[in-house]
Amino acid sequence: MMIEQMIGAALMLLFLADIFLTVLYARAGTGLIAPHWSRLIWALLRAVAAPFGRRRGEVLSVVGPLIVVSLIGFWAIGMAAGAALAIHPELGTAIRPSSGKASTDFVTALMVAGNSLSIVGGGDYSPHTTGTRLLFLINSLIGASMLSLVLSYLVQVYSALQARNALALTVDLMSDGTGDAAVMLARLMPEGEAGDATSDLGNLARSLAATKEAHHFYPLLFYFRFKEPFYAVSRFSFVLLDAATLIDTALDRGAMAL
């Protein structure tokens, strides 16, 4: 195996490990490359949004989806580059077109690598030795696995985002759009009667816990923001924490001790 092919294999393993830690291990900050890439894109887009002044929030509202798209493209390019490094030395010999002269430049290697990661034997170039046939097979299995993993990951990210937004909207409606915990508690307990307040607050606590854990599972959620202020995580978290403080302050400790 040539040094170029060893570098290609190492690059593919690096990106596969990053995908594994980001998509399957699913804990915030555990990725090898993805966290740094996401922070880089976020910093660049914040700089782009800075001159927009009051419309800065509207510009930043598209940052989350752009980071998702850029991360998927980054993974795809990284995997294709690694596969191309493994394929490049074999062009024109073990990997060649069915007819005509074989091109041996790196761009052709990238094209063949992209085809091998998507469809075995796709394109004009095909393997002609046992080793290269196995390489194409492994590439196709990796490509198909990556596609299914990334698609399922996206579904889960947007499901978690929808649940987070539903919690934010619920808190906003319960506080009559004020974002005031005192107003929310007054609406939950009219004239001081708790009624179903315990059940409602319990549902909010479960939703908040699920939202917190979703951000550990899917760190990309940190980069999603919306121009409507009531969707902000900081806002509804503050309202709920303030409500918990008000309830704790009003509790009769003596009665609880009995």
Image: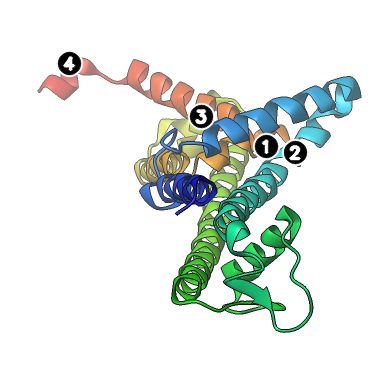
Disc 2 crowd, CA 10 A, few/some/many (<14, 14-19, 20+): some
* Image coordinates for residue 180, horizontal then vertical, percent: 59, 25
Of the residues under marks 3 and 4, which one precedes in the sequence? 3
Of the residues under marks 3 and 1, which one precedes in the sequence? 1
Residue located beneath label 1 in the image: 225
Of the pair 123 and 40, the residue shown nearer to us? 123
Secondary structure of the residue carrying numbered label 2: loop
Residue at image coords 45%, 35%: 189
Eye-nearest disc, 3 or 4: 3
Residue located beneath label 3 in the image: 237
Residue located beneath label 2 in the image: 61
Split into 4 quadrants, where in the image is the C terminus? Answer: top left
Residue at image coords 69%, 50%: 69
Q: Is residue 62 above or below residue 144?
A: above
Q: Amino acid at mark 1?
A: Arg
Of the pair 148 and 174, the residue shown nearer to us? 148
Quarter assignment of residue 177: top right
Residue 186 left/right relative to 205: right
Q: Amino acid at mark 4?
A: Gly
Disc 4 crowd, CA 10 A, few/some/many (<14, 14-19, 20+): few
Residue located beneath label 4 in the image: 254
